[in-house]
Amino acid sequence: MMNIFDFALDMVKESENLYRELMNETDNIGMKNILNMLADDEVKHYKAIQNAVKNLDNTSFADTKVLESGINIIKKFSINNDDIGISQKQLTIYKKAQQIELKSKNFYQEKADEASLPEHKSLLQWLALEEEKHYNLLDNIIIHVSRSETWVESAEFTTREEY
C-alpha cells in the first residue's frame, strides 16, 4: 500500500512534468520563467518531502517566492501591453493545472488535519500553503490572458478597473 508521502512524491513529480511541458509550448520568455519557477518549486517540494521522510526531526521548510515573482512578471505584461502568447488549448491546460493545484492543496490540508505527528502535520501544512501559492499564480495568469476576451468596457455601464 502506498503511504501518504509516496503519493505526495508522485503528485509533485506529475506537476513538475506538466509545468515543463507547458514551458516548451510557449515562446514568451516571461511565461517560460513563470513555468520554470513553478516546476522548480515542485522539485523543492519533492526534496522537502524526501528529506522529511528520512529525517523528520531536522527538517525546515522555506517558503518560496514564486507567487510574488510570477505576479511581478505578469504586471510587466500589463504595463507593456505584451501578448503572453497563450493559445486557447494552453489556457485550458492552465485551468486544469490550477484545478490540480487546488486538489493538491485540499489533499495536503486534509492529511495535515489527520496527522498525529507534529512533524508530519507541519510538512503537510507547508505543502498546502505552497500549492495555494501556485493556484493563485495560475489564477493571475488565467485572468490576465482571459481579460482581453471577457472584459468589455462601456463608459455608460462600467467603471474601468485597473489591471
Image (tube, helix red, strand yellow):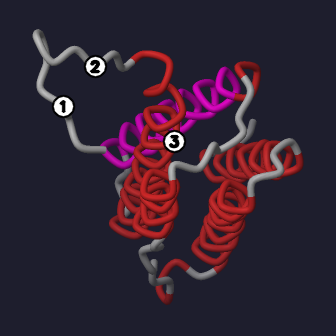
Residue occupying the far bottom of the picture: 58
In the picture shown, does residue 143 fall above or below 74?
Answer: above
Q: Position of residue 87 (x, y in %)?
A: 74, 27
Dot 3 or dot 1: first in sequence order is 3
What residue lies at 43% left-to-right and 58% top-to-bottom? 79
Which of discs 3 and 1 lies nearer the camera? The answer is 1
Instruction: Please state, as top left, top right, bottom left or bottom right, where the C terminus lies in the image.
Output: top left
Quarter of the image holding residue 35? bottom right
Name the residue that disc number 2 marks.
153
Q: CA distance from mark 2 to mark 1?
A: 7 Å
In the picture shown, does residue 37 fall above or below 125?
Answer: below
Horizontally, residue 16 falls left or right of residue 120, namely: right
Name the residue that disc number 1 marks.
160
Dot 2 or dot 1: first in sequence order is 2
Q: Which residues are magenta?
A: 91-114
Name the residue that disc number 3 marks.
141
The kind of secondary structure element at disc 2 is loop
In the picture shown, does residue 118 fall above or below 101?
Answer: below
